[in-house]
Amino acid sequence: MTPSPRPVTSVEDVYHTVEGAGLPVRRAFPTTRRMQHDPFLLLDHFGPVSWAPGEASGVPDHPHRGFETVTYILEGAMEHRDSAGGGAVLRPGDVQWMTAGAGIVHAEMPEADFKRRGGVLHGFQLWVNLPATHKMAPPRYQDIAADRIPAATSADGRVTARVIAGEALGARARIDTHTPIGYVHFTLRPGASIDHPVAPEQNTFVYVFKGEIRAGADAVTVGTTRLALFGGGTAVRLAVPETASGPAELILLSGTPIGEPVARYGPFVMNTHQEIRQAVADYQAGRMGRIRHGSTAQ
């Protein structure tokens, strides 16, 4: 069947903000214009920021309930710790898919040696909603090292895909998701073109973080740090002109909508306001646990 390229329905700017102890981020959503792209709740692009020795910052202890956080590191090293006793260091190319479920307290801070030496920190954090049936599931982690993330290259060598979730160019992700989701890091070299298949029921968008692309059936220009939303169809068409000065890099996200009510308050995402009040009460009472700091994650 011939793919039906989706049209670009909107190209949007990001919102600049600061998270935690001073980590600068570009927030693609939520913004005052758009709160979510069901099933996705938030997309933050942090960095690239160059830290002097001893200056790097992150996001200290904070709770989550009712959704999943996905952290993808491009440069630098971040240390994760949580109230369940978990800990890990994420290095370039690594992914952590954390299901907060019933509730967890965690911290995302620069790894000790990286903070001491300084350097560039760069990456993404995505929030993915959970359906009501999974919002109170036990917390769990899927940590995927860079060398275990499936990758593929097009026959002409001009398109490369790192497949964090879903499938691209014949490569299938190792991540297990609660709802059908695609999360692909594409690199498109000058002259590249691809029609990436996407299920017609899925919400789909791309975020460009390097270079410039032509997107959709009408080849709409999408520049660096801009978000392009797509309408209906069975494929996302992406291209980079032969005359481009260098490659483009982007994140493509697609997901089947959950279609349930969303109640959100800071780090809690549930279906009702009563569930939000209960989440706040549980956190304040210590029922989500506390982080034990001191040792070093590996």
Image (tube, rainbow, N blue to C red):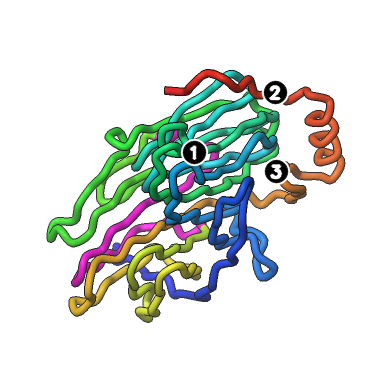
**Mark 3: amino acid:** Pro
The residue located at (48%, 22%) in the rendering is 296
Q: Which mark is residue 138?
A: none
The residue labelled by disc 3 is: 267
Q: Are marks 2 and 1 in contact (CB under 8 Å)?
A: no
The residue labelled by disc 2 is: 290
Front position among marks 3 and 2: 2
The alpha-carbon separation of the residues under discs 3 and 2 comes to 16 Å
| Among the two numbered marks 3 and 2 on one chain, the one whose residue lies closer to the N terminus | 3
The residue located at (34%, 73%) in the rendering is 212
Q: Is residue 38 left or right of residue 87?
A: right
Front position among marks 2 and 1: 1
Neighbor class of circle 2 (other Cα within 10 Å; few <14, some 14-19, many 20+) is some
| Among the two numbered marks 2 and 1 on one chain, the one whose residue lies closer to the N terminus | 1
* Residue that extends furthest to the left in the rendered view of this protein: 156
The alpha-carbon separation of the residues under discs 3 and 1 comes to 20 Å
Q: Which mark is residue 110?
A: 1
Q: x and y percent of residue 156 in the render?
A: 12, 60
Q: Quadrant of the N terminus?
A: bottom left
